[in-house]
Image (cartoon, rainbow, N blue to C red):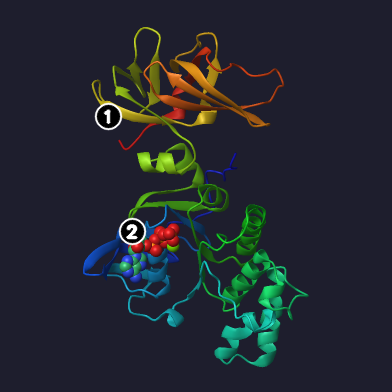
Amino acid sequence: MTEIQDATPAVHTDTLPAIELVGLVKSFTSHGEVVQAVKGIDMKIAEGEFFSMLGPSGCGKTTTMRMIAGFDEPTAGEVYLHGGNVVGVPPNKRDVNMVFQSYALFPHMSVAENVAFGLKRKGVAKEEVTRRVGEMLEIVGLTGREKRRPKELSGGQQQRVALARALVNNPRALLLDEPLAALDLKLRQAMQVELKRIQREVGITFVFVTHDQGEALTMSDRIAVMNDGLVDQLGSPREIYEHPASKFVAGFIGTSNLFSGTVSEVVGAEAVISYGPDERLVIQVSTGQVRVGSEIELTVRPEKIVISIEAPHGNGSAVKGTVTEVVYLGTATNYNVKTSTGADVVVFTQNATSAGDIAVRGDSIWLSWEPRHSYVIGA
Ligand SMILES: Nc1ncnc2c1ncn2[C@@H]1O[C@H](COP(=O)(O)OP(=O)(O)OP(=O)(O)O)[C@@H](O)[C@H]1O
Ligand SMILES: [Mg+2]
């Protein structure tokens, strides 16, 4: 399972944001057809934050980053960096640096020369270049490999050279566009830890683009989940995982079980969808969110559901079903269940004891969970 960050990140959203996007739109005209890559994005990224943009291929992540960096100008809207409007300002005059997915190191230059390149071009004095390159290689853990060529390094080491090359310019924010996509899983996980460490050490704002939800959940202070040129939800990893704001977010972030039905009763902060005398869904709602007769959709995460042979006690959700598949995963077991109303549900159970499976394929079982573990979607 993905480990999730604490609910309260060290983010100061009340002070001047490092990056602010206001009504950002980008259209391209290709072969006479207008493509709206970004359809109106508003967001504030705080100073020192590890901020991720997460979304499927083509949702507009790279286009948004290119407008922040200045490689593309918006069709409409504004980009503010540390309070200043930068629309029309060229990339090299913006206080940000971008690391591209294909990090394109100079193959004929050594590691040190690659990192020094930008500083030399700016005319920084030789001793200072040597000092800053040395410091940066130390931070990314490449001291001793100064003389190597990129092809003599592993993928992760090349990635760290690209990082050092961007960080050596002392940008106030670093934009990283899927920097780990080219790495295999193990290296990728090691680099996730490294990136977090480096960000803590240099203390600058990181904007990180990924289409990997696990990566975004483990690394970020906050995440913007993007869908088709818009931000569907912006929040901490925990908020996004536990309270998905849309069906898209619920489905994109991990496995989510969706139910739908008609509200039959609202009592205080709880709404009930009943399926007869003993089956019901019970959800926490805010005042006025739903009424008796409302058609609603709700979500519950697989690890919140309890499977039992006996009918559950308590006043939470209780649904009957039949086990259709049991998948043993070592530390956990996944159960696929078809409910009496025909919905497919996934249940994730930790194998804390070695007592064996709770149920086998074909068993009639009960699913139950507490009201606080399911949420109305999109209400
Ligand atoms: N220069 C361009 N001309 C025309 N269309 C473009 C251009 N650049 C991007 N697009 C379109 O804009 C949309 C968003 O593209 P973008 O590269 O921002 O997506 P992305 O979220 O970064 O995707 P991926 O995860 O695949 O990198 C896509 O439909 C893409 O085809
Ligand atoms: Mg992209």
**Residue at position x 37%, y 56% in the image:** 59
**Numbered label attached to residue 172:** none
For image coordinates 42% across by 66% down, the residue present is: 65
| Corner quadrant of residue 377 | top left
Read off the residue under disc 1. 288
First of labels 2, 1 by sequence position: 2
**Residue 250 position (above or below residue 101):** above
Specify the quadrant that holds the N terminus: top right
Instruction: Measuring from the top left, give residue 349's x and y in whole percent.
Output: 59, 26
User: Relative to 45, is 162 on the left or the right?
Assistant: right
- Please say whether residue 373 is visible from this viewpoint: yes
Crowding at mark 2 (Cα within 10 Å: few <14, some 14-19, many 20+): some
Q: Secondary structure at mark 2?
A: strand
Q: Nearer the viewer, residue 12 or 301?
A: 301
Residue 246 in sight in this render: no
Res. 42 mark: 2
Q: Amino acid at mark 1?
A: Gly
Crowd rating for badge 1 (residues with CA inside 10 Å; few <14, some 14–19, many 20+): few
Residue 57, image quadrant = bottom left
**Looking at the image, is 223 positioned above or below residue 29?**
above
Q: Position of residue 275 (x, y in %)?
A: 34, 13
Q: Position of residue 95 (x, y in %)?
A: 47, 76
Numbered-mark total: 2
Per the model, the C-alpha gap separating discs 2 and 1 is: 27 Å
